[in-house]
């Protein structure tokens, strides 16, 4: 018969085996310290933890983690900071959350677990796994503290906090957006990005790594902008993107969120917010009018004519949008050049004339509404007086149809038959932004780019929809 002492000794031996695994494997570490949440049966947590460990041990520079609410995002970020300190006590970790209270909570979770004193011989605590990693005595402030043998190893901050004087080898940003109101507020999203790029990035040391963990809201949220920004910079980016409901209808984790609970929750939400929170489909992407655009690269097809469509600015806050395009014999449109600007007529009139000459445009259709007729005459005059050019016919016309209805009804044709240069994002960034972010239902500051592009569809796809002046 096994005595209590022998049973305890056996448990201690098993603990040693578990501890050895936890040192080497991030998920095992989580499983040992928080077994009720990090269960072996929760495959998505194993996947997320393994991806985070692989990222830490790789030469990749940026990790974006998009996970639904209540699925352990912040908890796993906190656990990861603890595990990383166990791997290397010289790491300097900086975490950023949306306010000081949350950043303090995050900091205390890391600090307190490292400092936990073992009270139960049968329970594994952090110091069992990483006994050499300890908080420096007298240096355990809530948001800034050090490990023994180190200096300023951890700083927790927020957009309203400070990061001055702190260098980070690992930067962790955790859920900056707190609600839908912020997700819809472009000013707030812009401030998040400015804080991240102007303050936080300057704190990352050479060779440092960045982790952004959040529920997706908008394509302009920190995760969305970072994905585009860092890839364009040529950095190595890893993206973990987990949806609450899988494509086959099953749930990511029934224990955390069952299908019944999920359907109950999303019934109480707007479709856009539900798709963003649980399916990682940004609010503005879900409501976008144009889901895709065709592009071309290299040699273009033969054109039967070169045309231009110009929508002049109705007010000082509007954009002038002038587009040169080639028309193929099968009536496809290839965008050649774009003038999209808020500059005044003294700038745009000569610029538009120059663009017409450079692409040898045959016909330019210019909307004559709200001063457009005078603009067309001015461009025509510049063509003759400054370029000695009479090969472009200027058609000034009055657009009488409802702008929103025109844009919506021609959207499919634009996506199917208008081809943009492969690098149009960089050639005409403001025009690209206006086209890719245009919303089907309101919330649009400007519609000048879709309006002019719709004009191309009308000229080619649906015949004339105007009367000549």
Image (cartoon, rainbow, N blue to C red):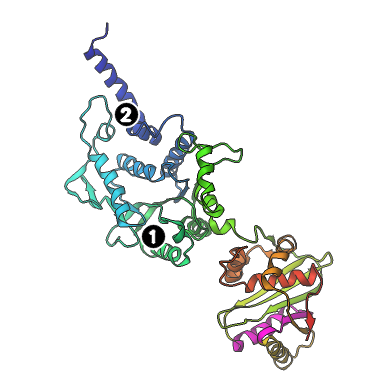
Helix, strand or loop under label 1:
helix
* 350 is higher (above) or lower (below) than 263: below
Q: Is residue 150 visible?
A: no
Q: In the image, which disc is placed on residue 401?
A: none
Horizontal arrangement in the rendering, residue 219 relative to residue 207 (left or right): right
Please give the name of the residue rendered at 28% of the width and 29% of the height, measured from the top-left corner.
124
Magenta region's main secondary structure?
helix
Where residue 446 appears, as percent x and y from the top left, is 58, 72
Q: Nearer the viewer, residue 105 or 433?
A: 105
Where residue 392 appears, as percent x and y from the top left, is 78, 83
Residue indicated by mark 1: 201
Label 2 crowd bin: few (<14), some (14–19), many (20+), radius 10 Å: many
Residue indicated by mark 2: 19
Gap between marks 2 and 1, in whole Å? Answer: 35 Å
* 437 is higher (above) or lower (below) than 212: below
Q: Which residues are magenta?
A: 345-370
Horizontal arrangement in the rendering, residue 348 relative to residue 154 (left or right): right
Q: Nearer the viewer, residue 185 or 456?
A: 185
Which quarter of the figure has residue 411? Answer: bottom right
Where residue 180 appears, as percent x and y from the top left, is 46, 57
Please give the name of the residue rendered at 33% of the width and 24% of the height, measured from the top-left corner.
17
Which quarter of the figure has residue 248? Answer: top right
Please give the name of the residue rendered at 35% of the width and 32% of the height, measured from the top-left corner.
22
Quadrant of the image containing the N terminus: top left
Q: Nearer the viewer, residue 261 or 300?
A: 261
Horizontal arrangement in the rendering, residue 445 relative to residue 112 (left or right): right
């Amino acid at each position: 018969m096994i005595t209590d002492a022998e049973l305890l000794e056996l448990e201690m031996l098993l603990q040693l085996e578990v501890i050895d695994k936890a040192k080497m494997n991030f998920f095992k570490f989580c499983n040992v310290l928080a077994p009720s949440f990090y269960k072996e049966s929760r495959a998505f947590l194993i996947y997320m933890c393994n991806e985070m460990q692989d990222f830490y041990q790789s030469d990749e520079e940026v990790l974006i983690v998009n996970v639904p609410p209540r699925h352990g995002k912040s908890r796993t970020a906190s656990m990861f900071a603890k595990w990383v300190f166990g791997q290397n006590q010289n790491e300097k970790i900086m975490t950023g959350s949306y306010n000081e209270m949350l950043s303090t909570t995050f900091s205390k979770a890391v600090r307190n677990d490292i400092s936990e004193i073992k009270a139960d011989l049968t329970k594994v605590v952090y110091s069992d796994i990483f006994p050499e990693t300890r908080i420096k005595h007298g240096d355990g402030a809530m948001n800034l503290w050090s490990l023994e043998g180190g200096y300023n190893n951890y700083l927790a901050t927020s957009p309203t906090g400070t990061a001055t004087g702190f260098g980070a080898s690992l930067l962790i940003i955790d859920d900056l957006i707190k609600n839908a109101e912020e997700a819809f507020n472009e000013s707030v999203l812009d401030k998040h990005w400015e804080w991240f790029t102007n303050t936080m990035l300057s704190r990352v040391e050479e060779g440092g790594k960045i982790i952004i963990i959040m529920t997706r809201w908008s394509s302009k949220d920190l995760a969305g902008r970072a994905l585009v920004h860092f890839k364009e910079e040529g950095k190595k980016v890893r993206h973990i993107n987990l949806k609450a409901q899988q494509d086959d209808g099953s749930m990511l984790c029934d224990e955390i969120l069952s299908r019944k609970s999920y359907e109950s929750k999303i019934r109480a939400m707007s479709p856009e917010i539900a798709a963003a929170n649980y399916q990682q489909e940004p609010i503005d992407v879900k409501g976008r009018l144009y889901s895709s655009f065709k592009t071309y690269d290299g040699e273009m097809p033969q054109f039967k004519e070169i045309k231009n469509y110009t929508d002049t600015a109705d007010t000082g806050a509007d954009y002038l949008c002038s587009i040169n395009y080639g028309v193929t014999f099968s009536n496809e449109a290839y965008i050649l050049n774009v003038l999209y600007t808020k500059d005044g007529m003294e700038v745009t009139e000569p610029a538009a004339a120059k663009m017409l000459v450079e692409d040898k445009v045959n016909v330019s259709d210019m909307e004559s509404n709200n001063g457009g007729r005078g603009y067309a005459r001015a461009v025509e005059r510049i063509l003759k007086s400054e370029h000695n050019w009479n090969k472009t016919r200027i058609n000034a016309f009055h657009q009488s149809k409802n702008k929103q209805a025109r844009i919506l009804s021609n959207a499919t044709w634009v996506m199917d038959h208008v081809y943009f240069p492969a690098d149009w994002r960089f050639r005409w960034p403001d025009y690209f932004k206006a086209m890719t972010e245009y919303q089907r239902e309101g919330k649009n500051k400007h519609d000048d780019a879709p309006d002019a592009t719709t004009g191309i569809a009308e000229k080619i796809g649906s015949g004339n929809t105007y009367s000549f002046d």
